[in-house]
Image (cartoon, rainbow, N blue to C red):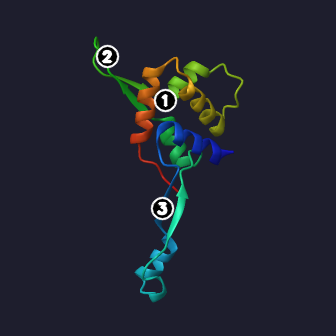
Amino acid sequence: MAKELSKQLCELCGLPSEKEVIDPKQKQLADHGDPRFSTPSLIKVTLDFTKPENFIRLFNLKWYLPDDEYGTQEAGLAFYVLFNYGNSSQDWNTEGFIRILIEILQNTRSELYIKYIKQSIREAEWVYG
């Protein structure tokens, strides 16, 4: 379930859900002179938003809205999700938060907010694997 939610969030935000990296075990052996691994192979790793390092970054994510009257305004993702869906019957755990975020991003009522939320998610650094 978590992998499906992460993949769906990646698709909504225009992020790759997988990428290829050098196999860290083979790289370590190659670095220690093992000739069998002079050319380490690539492995596919996925982006999982339920991993603690990614979830905390997602939960604390900020985005910035241009405002003609006050200049750029900072907004926080956790506050936005909890403020708009705090009374939801959704389970308030990691997967529940991501599920609600996906629901928000699929909602076309708040296109301006959604645009900046997606941009902030795309621009953040995520841990794959």
Report the amino acid beneath label 2. Answer: Asp
Report the residue at 51% width, 48% height from top.
53
Of the two numbered discs 2 and 3 on the same chain, state the one appearing first in sequence.
Answer: 3
Instruction: Provide residue 8's location: percent of width, then percent of height.
Output: 58, 40
Upstream in the sequence, badge 3 or badge 1? 3
Q: Which residue is mark 2?
A: 67
Residue furthest to the top in view is: 69
Classify 10 as above or below 85.
below
Where residue 87 appears, x then y in whole percent? Answer: 66, 19
Q: Which mark is residue 124?
A: none
Query: Which one is closest to the eye, mark 2 or mark 3?
Result: 3
Query: Which residue shows up at 58% across the image and 44% down it?
Result: 6
Secondary structure at numbered mark 1:
helix
SS assignment at label 2: loop
Amino acid type shown at disc 3:
Glu
Viewer-side label of 2, 1: 2
Q: CA distance from mark 2 to mark 1?
A: 18 Å
For residue 68, side relative to residue 83 (left or right): left
Q: Secondary structure at mark 3?
A: strand
For label 1, the residue is 77
- Classed neighbour count for the residue bearing mark 3: other residues with Cα under 10 Å, few (<14), some (14–19), many (≥20): few
- Where 100 falls versus 56 (above or below)? above
> Alpha carbon of mark 3 to alpha carbon of mark 1: how far?
29 Å
Quarter occupied by residue 123: top left
Q: Quadrant of the C terminus?
A: bottom right
- Tell me the kind of residue under disc 1: Leu
User: How many tags in the picture?
Assistant: 3
- Which residue in the protein does label 3 denote? 20
- Give the residue drawn at x 46%, y 76%: 40
Closer mark to the observer between disc 3 and disc 1: 3
